[in-house]
Amino acid sequence: MQEVGNGSLTYLNVSHNSLTEVEHFPWKNIEFLDLSSNLIGGNLPIPASTIRVFLISNNSFNGEVSSLICNASYLQILDLSHNYFSGTIPKCFGNFSYRLQFLNLKKNKFYGTIPLTFAGGCRLSNLKLNGNLLEGHLTPSILNCNDLEVLDLGNNKINDTFPHWLGSLPQLQVLVLKSNHMHGSLCVNSSKSSPFFSKIQIFDLSSNYFSGPLPVRYINSFKAIINLEKIASTGSYMGVTDPRGSGFYTYSIGIVMKGQDRDLLKNFTMWMIIDLSNNQFEGGIPKVIGKLNLLKGLNLSHNNLNGDIPTSIGNLTILEWLDLSSNRLSGTIPNRLADLPFLSSFNVSENQLHGQIPQGKQFNTFGNDSYEGNKGLCGFPVSKGCNIIEPAPPNVLEKDGSKSNIAFGWKVVLIGYGCGVVFGMFVGYVVFQTGKPKWLVNLVENQHEKRRRRKSKKGNRSSRRRRI
């Protein structure tokens, strides 16, 4: 192997094999070296200073990373992820970032703090330090990396308040700070009108100690999710192009999708996810969430949220999973949610919801575990039935679906009849209590006199006929 290329070898890919040992790299002009997904152990061998792409992820390397790696001043992509490296991160990683675009140290055992200085003119587009033992505060010098698209600092021990200043990074699309010791409110006190996180697509702050209301100002500024910010062509990837044009190095992000941990191995730019679960957020769910019409996943579970589920969530027509479980939400489940065509995972368990569960379409596929812990809910699939009030029978005056021309029904007739009876009884009572009213007596006597005269006339006529 040392003689391969006779000193002129520049590209070598032996990834996805069962190699167990590499003593040193003899190639003085090597530019691309991929040893990833093997069984190689021991300390990190240092490649020649000509190296541009160095990939050794998914091996068994251990020990500290020597600062000699920083002599590779042309390095653009460095992936040391999924190994057993320990010690502190070399400070020089921040100093030679004027060429470095991709730095992945994920799933190792690095401890200490994040490098405090990122040099001016930093070209980093992807910084992944997830799954280590890093602590302390974030460094504002990250703002020197204007091209930063992905910042993944999840699963560490970072103890800090939310870094609002990250919102001014113009290209930031993925921010993962999950599973740290971060705390405080996400409310913005600044009076600046410039938008925050205008290109953000994945916003994961889960499993921290954030408190206060949900960040309405940030939600209003997520222009890429609101579909107001132009993003890359549909179906394109986030990644780094091999400087030799021989390939494309894609990013991967670990997220909780539909209740399960997943790795997005090829991160489509159309993934839009917000995860604020397992914190201490309180107050209501803001209606402005309904503006995020490109959102695919929303997880607000395990907080102290209260109030109703906003019906505006029904505007999220491509939403695939919605988790609002383990809060203090009340009211009913909006029927509009049943019209979400792609909703395949839904969880509102352990709340204080009541009323009938929406029926039909996607809601017919959700099990009882989506609703448990809500004693007031009824209808399929829970065992409690709903007492549905039957609609009133049609008007008796209507036949064959045609409406009668009579403007009142039998109830109105009964009311009039009752009023007439009462009025008549009242008049009778007045007559008998006050004696004979003159007008009433005259009326009766006149009628009686007319009848008497008619009878006498008839009697005279009959007697004359008999005499003749």
Image: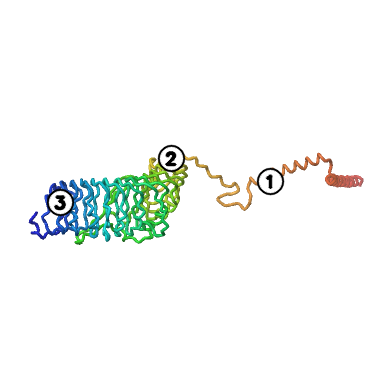
The alpha-carbon separation of the residues under discs 1 and 3 comes to 103 Å
Observer-side mark, 2 or 1, equals 2
Callout 1: helix, strand or loop?
helix
The three-letter code of the residue at mark 1 reads: Gly
Observer-side mark, 2 or 3, equals 3
Where is residue 379? Give x, y as percent. 44, 41
Q: According to the image, label 3 marks what residue?
A: 45
The three-letter code of the residue at mark 3 reads: Pro
The three-letter code of the residue at mark 2 reads: Asn
Q: According to the image, label 1 marks what residue?
A: 416
Query: Would residue 456 appear left or right of 8 to someone viewing this image?
Result: right
Above or below, comparing residue 374 to residue 75 in the picture:
above
Q: According to the image, label 2 marks what residue?
A: 374
The alpha-carbon separation of the residues under discs 2 and 1 comes to 50 Å
Name which of mark 2 and mark 3 comes first in the sequence.
3
Q: Quadrant of residue 6?
A: bottom left
Circle 1/circle 3 CB separation < 8 Å: no
Where is residue 345? Give x, y as percent. 36, 46
